[in-house]
């Protein structure tokens, strides 16, 4: 009894009151592409990028591929690329994940009136890991912990696809999980939607060239939300969902 | 952390001598660390390498076998070879007669499940997708009533072709990929990769860089042991444990993020050194975080371990005896919970662990309780160790050395004690100094079978707690 009280007191209050205003110290998140001009003909950042996330003229970074590894920042001779601790990187479109020079945060997730009406007060998620390395899976679990406490907005992970409104996919989509993913998706009742969580799910990430993948599912079902990162920060996920569903917080 | 670098030709012998020496060394007390194949120049051959550890030293033995080769499986007498021989059978078609169970390790080729015969026997199949947010795998329980007589584990769903991808890029640029082999033990895999690569390049990293890596490794261990403890507490509905260990894990991973930008230690370790920065400001926060962990663990640990309900749910459940653990060659936390002293930080120490020693933790009961207590005690030891090292290094922001060309025709083996157990990376170059072969071994590969054993004669409802008490990697097995 006493030890239980001591634990309760030490636990204190842990939840982040306003998730949108959080500032994760040290987090390597949203890149900035500075106005500094590139050296003529320089392509130093291209070969070091492990996922082909960078394009030049003008410099752009595709957050759907980026692993936030920092290789480009270190390779650049003119310090054009840097990283901030910004976590608002989710997008409701694939193109919305491309960061351009001087653009700041990617275009904010647009509220989907349809999804807001259906799921704005209660959203149940079924996670399917298809080659996820447990980085994404741990961060998805963390979204429900006492710090981020996603449940306060009526958003929870559920065990059965039958109880779910959306499937959250992590990992690059392996061949060996193809059938299980299809069957889980069939198990979700309509209306339902797809969320791509992490660089692997969005683009294949570091595994894009592997012959062991079958990404056909995502060719047929376009995600309603893309959550970049390797793995994504729980804040990127929860705030992205709140924006999509028009949840004020 | 230790690396061995050899000219493999000097350790190659004919197959008769190979098997003879291998058996002799094992019977003299050497421990099997790894046993793997690689394609030979002649496609009719496969090259077999055994990695052994004895008296604080790694060694290798090698031979070539013609394909399709058939011989009596070593597993028939030495069960520690079972998973390695299954892998050899799958990858190179070796015909290993008298192997008790050549079930595929990763391929989805059909292979019959064991089935229990009897009137009231029933089977329960779960997965690959499970109830929680967790990687996929299939488990089949063969039960009489509630009692599990056998658990068969079928993995491979996560197979991403890692080892093939590792050969497609510049061997010096594999950091990000290596960190996702098993993404919750990124620092251990990255360190093993870098240590082997640096050995091939003849680069010696600075002591400070080694210290930085070792700090990252202990932070990762603390964070993941806390995650396992939170999971175990939740699985037995001891909710204060779940929320408190979960909250403390946040403190630990945010400490990693402060140093390297990632809650998973991504980008902490890179070839030639470490990118993580621990300047005085970061170190002050890190120390405050470690103090908070120490203080609050002193409150939650006795609360958890003193609770009768927890003792009742963990003691005697999921037992793996010392004999079983030795026979199967189990490693890491699971081995230490069954009374086996195996910890690469102590057995194969690099310069940092030679100077700043880690006190090994051993429990003897081999059950879920022992696996929980090993974690709790290891966190305490990691915290003590970090304090000692941070005192000696008030700042730690090493520069990275340049890693140049790799020595041709050389094999480097590195072993790093990650939070689950030993992570083994074997890199071998060809005549031109390019990477010819990359073998990755996550501790999960060897320990999955221990989970299956632990379930025998336990109730099926004990599966979640047994599974969490091992907390193995699916990706690390499936590669
Ligand atoms: S940080 Fe992103 S864009 Fe830059 S090199 Fe790494 S993966 Fe490529």
Image (cartoon, helix red, strand yellow):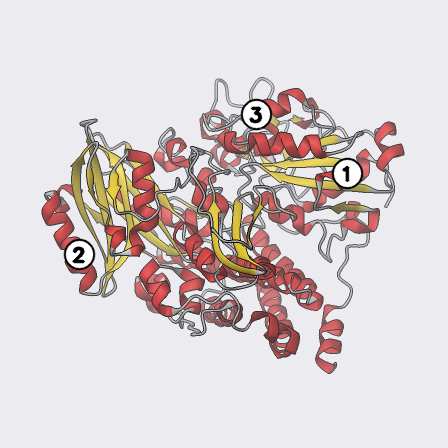
Q: Which is more toward the observer, B467 or A84? A: B467
- Using the rendered view, name the quadrant where residue A238 is placed: top right
Are both tags, 2 and 1, on one chain? no
Which residue is the site of mark 3? A215
Q: Name the chain under label 1.
A: A
Q: Which mark is residue B23?
A: 2
Furthest residue toward front:
B119
Residue B454 vs residue B126: left or right?
Answer: left
The kind of secondary structure element at disc 3 is loop
Q: Which is more toward the observer, A76 or A134? A: A134
Asked if the residue at tag 1 contacts the one at tag 3, i.e. Cβ–Cβ closer than 8 Å, the answer is no
Q: Name the chain under label 3.
A: A
The kind of secondary structure element at disc 2 is helix
Instruction: Note whether residue A184 is visible.
Output: yes
- Using the rendered view, name the quadrant where residue B146 is placed: bottom right
Image-quarter location of ligand 1: top right
The kind of secondary structure element at disc 1 is helix
Marks 2/1: CA–CA distance: 58 Å
Residue at image position (50%, 38%) is B158
Q: Looking at the image, is A90 positioned above or below residue B205?
A: above
Determine crowd level at label 1: few under 14, some 14-19, many 20+ residues with C-alpha closer than 10 A.
many
Between circles 3 and 1, the one closer to the viewer is: 3
Residue at image position (75%, 49%) is A22
Marks 3/2: CA–CA distance: 46 Å
Image location of residue A234, percent across then percent down: 68, 46
Residue at image position (58%, 17%) is A57
Which residue is the site of mark 1? A241
Q: Quadrant of the N terminus of chain A?
A: bottom right
Image location of residue B32, percent across then percent down: 27, 56
Image location of residue B341, percent across then percent down: 35, 69
- Using the rendered view, name the quadrant where residue A61 is placed: top right
Image location of residue A162, percent across then percent down: 74, 39
């Amino acid at each position: 009894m006493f030890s239980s009280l001591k634990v309760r007191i030490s636990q204190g209050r842990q939840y982040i009151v306003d998730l949108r205003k959080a500032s994760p110290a040290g987090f390597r998140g949203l890149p900035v592409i500075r106005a500094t001009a590139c050296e003529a003909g320089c392509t130093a950042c291209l070969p070091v990028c492990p996922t082909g996330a960078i394009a030049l003229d003008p410099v752009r970074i595709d957050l759907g591929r980026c692993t936030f590894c920092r290789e480009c920042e270190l390779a650049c001779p003119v310090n054009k690329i840097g990283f901030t601790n910004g976590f608002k990187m989710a997008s409701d479109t694939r193109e919305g994940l491309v960061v351009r020079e001087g653009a700041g945060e990617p275009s904010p997730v647009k509220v989907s009136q349809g999804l807001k009406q259906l799921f704005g007060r209660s959203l149940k998620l079924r996670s399917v890991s298809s080659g996820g390395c447990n980085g994404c899976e741990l961060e998805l679990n963390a979204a429900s912990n006492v710090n981020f406490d996603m449940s306060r907005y009526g958003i929870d992970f559920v065990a059965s696809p039958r109880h779910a409104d959306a499937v959250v996919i992590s990992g690059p989509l392996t061949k060996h999980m193809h059938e299980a993913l299809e069957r889980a998706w069939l198990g979700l009742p309509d209306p339902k939607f797809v969320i791509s969580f992490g660089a692997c799910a969005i683009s294949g990430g570091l595994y894009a060239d592997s012959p062991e993948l079958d990404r056909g599912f995502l060719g047929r079902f376009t995600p309603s939300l893309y959550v970049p990162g390797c793995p994504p920060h729980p804040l990127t996920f929860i705030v992205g969902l709140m924006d999509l569903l028009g949840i004020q917080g | 952390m230790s690396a061995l670098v050899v000219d493999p030709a000097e350790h190659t012998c004919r197959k008769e001598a190979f098997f003879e020496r291998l058996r002799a060394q094992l019977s003299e007390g050497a421990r099997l660390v790894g046993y793997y194949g690689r394609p030979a120049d002649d496609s009719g051959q496969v090259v077999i390498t055994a990695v052994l550890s004895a008296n604080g030293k790694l060694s290798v033995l090698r031979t070539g076998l013609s394909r399709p080769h058939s011989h009596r499986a070593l597993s028939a007498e030495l069960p520690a070879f079972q998973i390695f021989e299954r892998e050899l059978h799958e990858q190179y078609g070796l015909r290993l007669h008298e192997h008790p169970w050549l079930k595929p390790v990763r391929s989805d080729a059909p292979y019959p499940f064991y089935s229990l015969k009897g009137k009231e026997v029933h089977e329960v199949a779960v997965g690959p997708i499970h109830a929680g947010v967790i990687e996929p795998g299939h488990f089949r329980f063969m039960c009489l009533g509630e009692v599990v007589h056998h658990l068969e584990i079928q993995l491979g769903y996560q197979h991403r072709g890692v080892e093939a991808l590792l050969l497609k890029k510049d061997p010096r640029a594999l950091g990000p990929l290596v960190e996702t082999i098993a993404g919750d033990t990124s620092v251990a895999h990255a360190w093993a990769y870098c240590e082997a690569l640096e050995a091939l390049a003849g680069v010696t990293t600075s002591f400070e860089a080694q210290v930085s890596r070792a700090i990252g490794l202990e932070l990762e261990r603390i964070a993941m042991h806390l995650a396992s403890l939170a999971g175990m507490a939740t699985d037995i509905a001891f909710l204060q444990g779940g929320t408190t260990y979960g909250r403390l894990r946040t403190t630990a991973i945010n400490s990693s993020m402060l140093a390297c930008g990632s809650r998973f230690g991504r980008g902490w370790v890179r070839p030639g050194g470490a990118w993580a920065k621990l300047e005085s400001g970061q170190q002050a926060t890190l120390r405050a975080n470690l103090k908070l962990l120490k203080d609050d663990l002193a409150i939650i640990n006795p609360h958890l371990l003193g609770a009768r309900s927890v003792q009742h749910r963990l003691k005697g459940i999921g037992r793996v005896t010392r004999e079983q653990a030795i026979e199967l060659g189990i490693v890491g936390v699971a081995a230490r919970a069954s009374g086996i002293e195996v910890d690469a930080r102590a057995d194969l120490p690099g310069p940092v662990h030679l100077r700043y020693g880690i006190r090994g933790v051993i429990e003897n009961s081999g059950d879920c309780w022992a696996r929980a207590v090993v974690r709790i005690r290891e966190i305490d030891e990691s915290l003590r160790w970090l304090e000692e090292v941070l005192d000696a290094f008030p700042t730690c922001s090493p520069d990275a050395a340049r890693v140049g060309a790799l020595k041709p025709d050389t094999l480097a083996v590195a072993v790093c004690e990650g939070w689950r157990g030993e992570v083994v990376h074997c890199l071998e170059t060809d005549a031109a100094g390019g990477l010819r072969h990359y073998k990755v071994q996550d501790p999960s590969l060897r320990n999955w079978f221990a989970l299956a054993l632990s379930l025998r004669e336990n109730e099926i409802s004990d599966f979640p707690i047994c599974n969490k008490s091992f907390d193995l990697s699916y990706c690390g097995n499936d590669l």
